[in-house]
Image (spheres, rainbow, N blue to C red):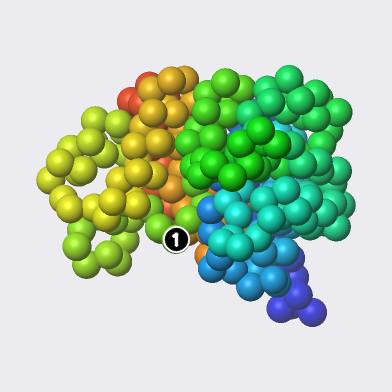
């Protein structure tokens, strides 16, 4: 009985500590670039979908932009991901291309938009989902661009044992110049910088393979990856008080 009470108290403490973040993000658009699907099992993918639905359930407005695994039909994959979200208890709908009017309509009707970068006119063209996610984040005035990939964030040093929890554009540009980041990570960083410089509140680089990486990043003090902001004026109130 005492052990059960301790577990309940721990869970309650976690919920209470998440309140400032839930308050800050309520009603905000969160664009999630789902770029980690190829590294997830079916169960891991379903767990991630539950976490996206959790964001929706606490008042955020998630938009999902997804990669398509090699050899799969882009539009069928779009419908599949929307169906996975619906199986978690929230309405979702697939959208082809950057159709801002349709995105806003679906958000206003309480759906989760699931976006494939291609539409029927360019279905065979290679379109980068991360660039699409960044463009949508900018054009919708999103609070966050979240990049789910295989990178845990920007490592603090070559030992790769820890990542920077938060960097300004100036700081991350300095690190890019000083260190030899992989080209794939540089591309992610550049899209994150472009997003915040064009008005998105902040960008997040997260390892999508980490269990519950979204709630850990968004609802805890330490987070799970690297946040990139334009400058220190973009800190949240509860971050300035730390």
In the foreground, 217 or 37: 37
**Residue that badge 1 annotates:** 150
Residue at horizontal 67 percent and vertical 40 percent from the top: 115
Q: Is residue 219 above or below residue 47?
A: above
- The picture places residue 41, in percent across and down from the top left corner, at 63, 73
Name the residue at 44% across, 48% down. 205
The residue under the point 59% across, 45% down is 124
**Position of residue 65 measured from the top left corner of the image (x, y, whole percent):** 62, 43
Q: Quadrant of residue 125?
A: top right
- Callout 1 environment at 10 Å: few (<14), some (14 to 19), or many (20+)? some
The answer to whether residue 26 is above or below residue 152 is above
Q: Say whether residue 20 is left or right of residue 7.
A: left
Picture quadrant where residue 151 is located: bottom left
Rendering coords of residue 178 (x, y %): 12, 45
Residue 101 seen: yes
Q: Quadrant of residue 88?
A: bottom right
């Amino acid at each position: 009985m005492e052990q059960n009470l301790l577990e309940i108290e721990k869970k309650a403490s976690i919920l209470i500590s998440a309140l400032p973040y839930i308050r800050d993000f309520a009603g905000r658009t969160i664009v999630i670039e789902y770029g980690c699907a190829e590294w997830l099992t079916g169960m891991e993918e379903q767990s991630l979908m539950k976490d996206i639905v959790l964001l929706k359930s606490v008042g955020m407005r998630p938009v999902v932009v997804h990669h398509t695994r090699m050899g799969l039909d882009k539009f069928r994959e779009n419908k599949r991901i929307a169906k996975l979200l619906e199986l978690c208890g929230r309405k979702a709908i697939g959208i082809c291309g950057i159709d801002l009017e349709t995105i806003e309509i679906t958000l206003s009707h309480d759906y989760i938009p699931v976006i494939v970068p291609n539409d029927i006119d360019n279905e065979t063209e290679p379109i980068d989902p991360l660039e699409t996610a960044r463009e949508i984040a900018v054009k919708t005035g999103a609070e966050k661009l979240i990049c789910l990939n295989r990178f845990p964030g920007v490592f603090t040093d070559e030992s790769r044992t820890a990542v920077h929890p938060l960097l300004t554009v100036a700081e991350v540009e300095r690190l890019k110049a000083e260190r030899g980041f992989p080209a794939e990570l540089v591309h992610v960083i550049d899209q994150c910088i472009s997003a915040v410089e064009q008005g998105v509140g902040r960008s997040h680089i997260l390892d999508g393979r980490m269990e519950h990486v979204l709630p850990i990043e968004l609802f805890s003090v330490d987070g799970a990856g690297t946040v990139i902001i334009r400058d220190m004026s973009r800190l949240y109130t509860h971050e300035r008080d730390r």
